[in-house]
Image (spheres, rainbow, N blue to C red):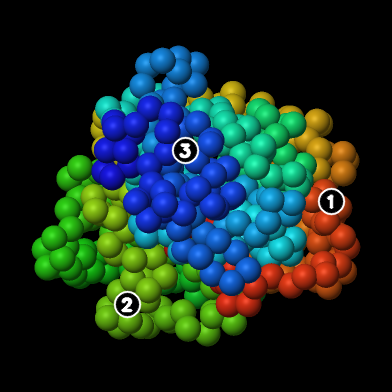
Amino acid sequence: MRLRIIAALVSLTVVLSPATAARAADDPLLDQLTAIPGLSVISETPSTGYRFFVLSYRQPADHRHPGQGTFEQRLTLLHRSNGAPVVLATSGYGLAVAPRPSQTEPTALLNANQISVEHRFFRDSRPAPADWSDLNIWQEATDEHRIVTAFKGLFSGNWIRTGGSKGGMTSVYHKRFYPRDIDGVVAYVAPDDVINPADGAYDRFFDTVGTPACRATLDNVQREALRRRDRLVPRVQAAADAQGWTFDRTIGTADRSFEMTVLDSVWAFWQYSTLADCASVPAATATDDELYDWIDGVAGWDFYTDQGLEYYFPYYYQAAAQLGWPSLRFEHLRGLRNHPGLYTANSSLPPELRRAHNPLPMLDVDLWVRTAGERMLFIYGENDPWGAERFTPSRRDSALFVAPGGNHGANIARLSPEDSAAATAMLRRWAGAPVTLSAAPPAGLPLDDMLGDRRRLR
């Protein structure tokens, strides 16, 4: 709300607190920020070795018709020096309600500046009123293009684009539409659902991941939960009544929410657990309490509720309209499902936001990455289901690496030593940085995992 008030009160000037405004006269960096048209400086957190700003930047709601309304897109700036490389990052979701300084892995490896972007339509970065047809991959890529254009006069270093999961996908789309904006992309655990119904790769993944014993135990958890539906659904409903959860706006009923959560549980397990965690999976003889609690721990009974899904409406809208979603056969659950058509993106949206799928954008992006993409680095986890359908980089100074035994948190540090060294050298070359940095990044600045949802992408 604060950002929208700012947007209403100013045209192309910056909004500063009195204390910040008083410092602007003798603060070259603040002078440079205030000189960027459409930029608002909301707050600053100074620290040793860097300065951290929360910003907002005025964007057209529709870049094809820029005169038809604007919105304020939230950003943060982690500033090291004007001559250092710049990492442009997004999770593909929203920024934290109260952003705090953190650095992505490329930022740490390069001792770089970092601009983090809240994806349009998440949190405060949503036009009002919202035309949801403006939520597409080209519009967000153009948001980022305008941000790069606005800040390039401030920084002399090379630009690296990065993001994890949906943020990795968003990084690829930015590079596809505006390839000259940035000098390299590091896309972490980014799925590439080229042809939405052709999802056999996901079924093959679940047929081979881990060990036969672990796969059998996980399958049995799902079977047993669905067999005990008459006892477990009332527990979900009781939890909903106690916590104020509802289902009628999105998923429909407690029974549908229960089934979706059970279907999601094995995916969620492999997304953020490891093979060692198989020992904690309940056996088929587990009690109702043990099954209920384990599924709650890995998938969360609260997620497929109106309240749990609302923040993710922009993701589900994009998945339904353009990005695609994994469709699994669940052959081991034949005869146990009450809602066979439930496992879709539209099931998690209110009726007014449900959309037919357009396959052309993903076909276009996939072909471009394979044939024309340059300086693109893809990192995947061996045991991450989102890596079942991966981007295929071209031979134009690009590469793909897989972290052994890795999950959805895979990164350069988790690669084999040889692959980690190769990926790091590639990144530093693109950034114009020395192979080994002379200055270490400030101690105590946490790494940002760049994932908008620690439990699942969808």
Residue at 12% over, 68% down: 242
Q: Residues within 10 Å of mark 2 (few under 14, many from 20)?
A: some
142 left or right of 293? right
Q: Secondary structure at mark 2?
A: helix
Depth order, front residue of 255/181: 181
As shown in the figure, which amino acid type bears the numbered disc 1? Gly
Q: Which residue is tagged 3?
A: 39
Q: In the rendering, which numbered label is found on residue 432? A: 1
- Under mark 3, the amino acid is Leu
Res 80 → quadrant: bottom right
| Distance between the alpha carbons at the discs numbered 3 and 1 | 28 Å
Mark identifier at residue 293: 2
Q: For numbered disc 1, what is the local secondary structure?
A: loop
User: In this orientation, does residue 201 appear?
Assistant: no
Q: Position of residue 438 (x, y in %)?
A: 83, 70
Q: Earlier in the sequence, mark 2 or mark 3?
A: 3
Q: What residue type is disc 2 on?
A: Asp
In 3D space, how far apart are the residues under numbered discs 2 and 1 (Cα atoms)? Answer: 50 Å
Q: Are marks 2 and 3 in contact (CB under 8 Å)?
A: no
Q: Quick one: quadrant of the N terminus?
A: top left
